[in-house]
Amino acid sequence: MEPDRRLTAQGMERKQQLLDCAAELFAERGYAETRVIDIVRAAGVAKGLFYWYFENKEALFKELAGSIRLNLRRQQGAALDPGATPLVNLYRGTESSVIFMAEHAPYFSLLEEEGRNFVDVMRQGTQQHIKDMVQLIKAGQSDGTIREENPMLLALGVVGSVGHYSRVHRTGRIDLSLPELAAFVARYVVHSVASGDVSVRDALRQVTAVAAPV
Amino acid sequence: MEPDRRLTAQGMERKQQLLDCAAELFAERGYAETRVIDIVRAAGVAKGLFYWYFENKEALFKELAGSIRLNLRRQQGAALDPGATPLVNLYRGTESSVIFMAEHAPYFSLLEEEGRNFVDVMRQGTQQHIKDMVQLIKAGQSDGTIREENPMLLALGVVGSVGHYSRVHRTGRIDLSLPELAAFVARYVVHSVASGDVSVRDALRQVTAVAAPV
Amino acid sequence: MEPDRRLTAQGMERKQQLLDCAAELFAERGYAETRVIDIVRAAGVAKGLFYWYFENKEALFKELAGSIRLNLRRQQGAALDPGATPLVNLYRGTESSVIFMAEHAPYFSLLEEEGRNFVDVMRQGTQQHIKDMVQLIKAGQSDGTIREENPMLLALGVVGSVGHYSRVHRTGRIDLSLPELAAFVARYVVHSVASGDVSVRDALRQVTAVAAPV
Amino acid sequence: MEPDRRLTAQGMERKQQLLDCAAELFAERGYAETRVIDIVRAAGVAKGLFYWYFENKEALFKELAGSIRLNLRRQQGAALDPGATPLVNLYRGTESSVIFMAEHAPYFSLLEEEGRNFVDVMRQGTQQHIKDMVQLIKAGQSDGTIREENPMLLALGVVGSVGHYSRVHRTGRIDLSLPELAAFVARYVVHSVASGDVSVRDALRQVTAVAAPV
DNA sequence: AATGAATGAGGATTCATTCAT
DNA sequence: AATGAATGAATCCTCATTCAT
């Protein structure tokens, strides 16, 4: 496919269909093990059509990477509420991240399964998130609600926990509703960074006052 | 290779050399992207010799998986001290796990990069670890030092945090000595599961009394 | 395309446009290396339209061959003047052939570049020319102006020289006006077959009396 | 095949065998129409072996081009005898060229059939030949045996005639022994450039005195 | 007539594996 | 044990041709 071919609405759909089928297959069995013919079969079209929409297999992979990057970026903005306390923001941000990742499971599966090929995407995608966390944690350290540790290290832990629980949820090893899981993870990270019992209790009381009871 | 071929000492060395080269290449660029010729070249032998030592490429991979499983098992036993409190055991176990994973970085790299192909190994390798954690957490909940949450969920969080920080360390994104990192992670997980400030402070005081100062 | 589809004047133009674009591309990069899409792009129409005007790629090629054949035939008649001497006819025929080939350069390029696929066309196209030459040479041998050699061999030489110089001219390796080149080639072939100095001088005097001075 | 792999004598043979088979097939039906599988079948080996000896199809083609260039160069030196007169040298050089080209028919077939892809080879291969001819012709013009015309144009005619007759011979349209044909072509070109009857007669007498009678 | 998406047979290339030496 | 040439199934990609609109 020539770089800048204009696609009709129908063409966009077809292309998206191929992208979706490919994402699923890549996540399931990996890039190398996914044949072009598997993708087109999953989409129910002829092999040649693949090359109408994509230069080659790798180009499709890169488009996927691009759309994942977009998805990641879209999520980042929504998280923080300037009016709330750091711990509350941490709670809410964690909750929404877990839900977002669960709802975009195939993309994140792919990201992790094909990590080697997505190094850039992952780096860029997580970087902003981590920066936000670092800000939050520093604010919490200022007001005494977050314990005095290297903020970057703490932030890495928070982001890692969110990712880990999402992953575990995705692989079906947790038998919990998504909101329940999200709330649990939010509590988990609040505990892991909070300086002490009082601040934790306060933060949890604030979020549960407006959200679901703990 | 016929399954029960007896190898001389020299032969064992040759074979191990091939295994090592393969492990490195697999971790670096993945199983599918690693050619048999890459492995033999890295080992400096002729292509045909590969098939003297291994039935085929997959057989080598399985041998690698086997040795990784062995390594994992070896680590599991060392963790728990029946005389210590649950939180102290959690602290010590976390510390030693982080160090163990850092010291066997290539194997864990491979495990994660080739997760799809190591599902069994990972399941089995982590399962016992998680069971131990669950026991520990239940004990902590009994004596009031660990907060009342689903023990399995908490255990998953602990194991995940350990793995996550090891991974981050492996990829060079943390500029910290290994003991420092291990201590940090141990504090992190103690915080994340502990019921309150008092229990955390007690646990940390106990471990730091016998180990490095916080 | 159904064989006997009637085309409007506009349709004929469209078709000719496709033929011209194809001829150019074929001459430039060969039949096999020219894609249908290249042709339609050069003509600025959609791919599907190609098959409205031509059964398939080969059919277009054959139509080209046909028109080349027509061109070749048209040229043949014009050459000989029954009143002139053989050497003069040779001179004049050579001159006009060179000019004709230069003026139909793309067709002859194609003929030569795709010789393999034009064997028939070339055979038929040259055959009559050679026959005429043989007649001419035999006549010249009878009146003593052409040397005693196998007439067919001499004829092949004449035709070859004409073709060779045209080709060289086409590829831009000669910096000479077309009339000058044609005159040179005519002299060249007269020399190559003439029996001796006297006959050559006579022939050249005759043609230059009515044409440009030597 | 890696660029500088060292080949055993046997390997060289195998490779040459593939080159020869390919040359023949290319000359017969063209590069584009020759499948890799045709080549290996002609050589009686498996498809994969092709890629042991050559990077890809095009690399083989380029090696062929290289060897053709070598052959052409080898021929160039042998031609001229400094002691002989220009016309005699022209005669002898022409004769030997025709024979050389006939003996390397497959290569020259390939050169002409795939002219488009061999532009460089042909240019370089012919250039020296033409330069030699130009020298010879200038010498002949000095001693009055060659007529006063643009030497380059005359040289082009000589080289073209040699090529043309070789081509015709190759395609079987001439029923003449090779020495006979070579002698004929030599006479043809001597006539085409000689200034007059006397010089031609002298030159032909000289060469036939030491060679075969005309 | 005209468009461009859709089709699938065909061909180049890769690479795990075998084999003669 | 060791070598590296030989094998061929599997895969990606091209492109002439068809088809619905």
Image: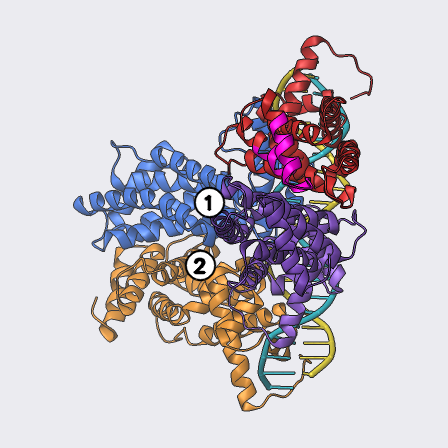
Chain colours: A blue, B orange, C red, D purple, E yellow, F cyan
The answer to whether residue A42 is visible is no
Q: Are marks 1 and 2 on the same chain?
A: no
- Give the number of the disc on residue B56: none
Report the residue that reaches farthest toward the bottom. Answer: B8
Q: Amino acid at mark 1?
A: Leu
Where is residue C10, by image quadrant?
top right
Relative vertical location of residue E14 with respect to residue C180 in this rendering, above or below: below
Marks 1/2: CA–CA distance:
14 Å
Reading the image, the residue beneath label 1 is A181
Viewer-proximal residue, C187 or C128?
A: C187
Read off the chain for label 2: B
Viewer-proximal residue, C45 or C141?
A: C141
**Residue drawn at (55%, 66%) of the image:** B121
Relative vertical location of residue D111 with respect to residue B41 in this rendering, above or below: above
Viewer-proximal residue, A213 or C85?
A: C85
Quarter of the figure that contains the C terminus of chain D? bottom right
Where is residue C171 shown, x and y percent of the image?
A: 54, 36
Q: Secondary structure at mark 2?
A: helix
Where is residue A100 shown, x and y percent of the image?
A: 45, 38
Q: Is residue C204 magenta?
A: yes
Specify whether E1 is left or right of B70.
Answer: right
Q: Which residues are magenta?
A: C184-206
Q: Is residue C143 magenta?
A: no
The answer to whether residue D60 is visible is yes
Q: Mark 2: give few (<14), some (14-19) or many (20+) Cα within 10 Å.
A: many
Q: Amino acid at mark 2?
A: Ala
Reading the image, the residue beneath label 2 is B155
Q: Mostly what secondary structure, the magenta segment? A: helix
**Residue drawn at (76%, 46%) of the image:** C149
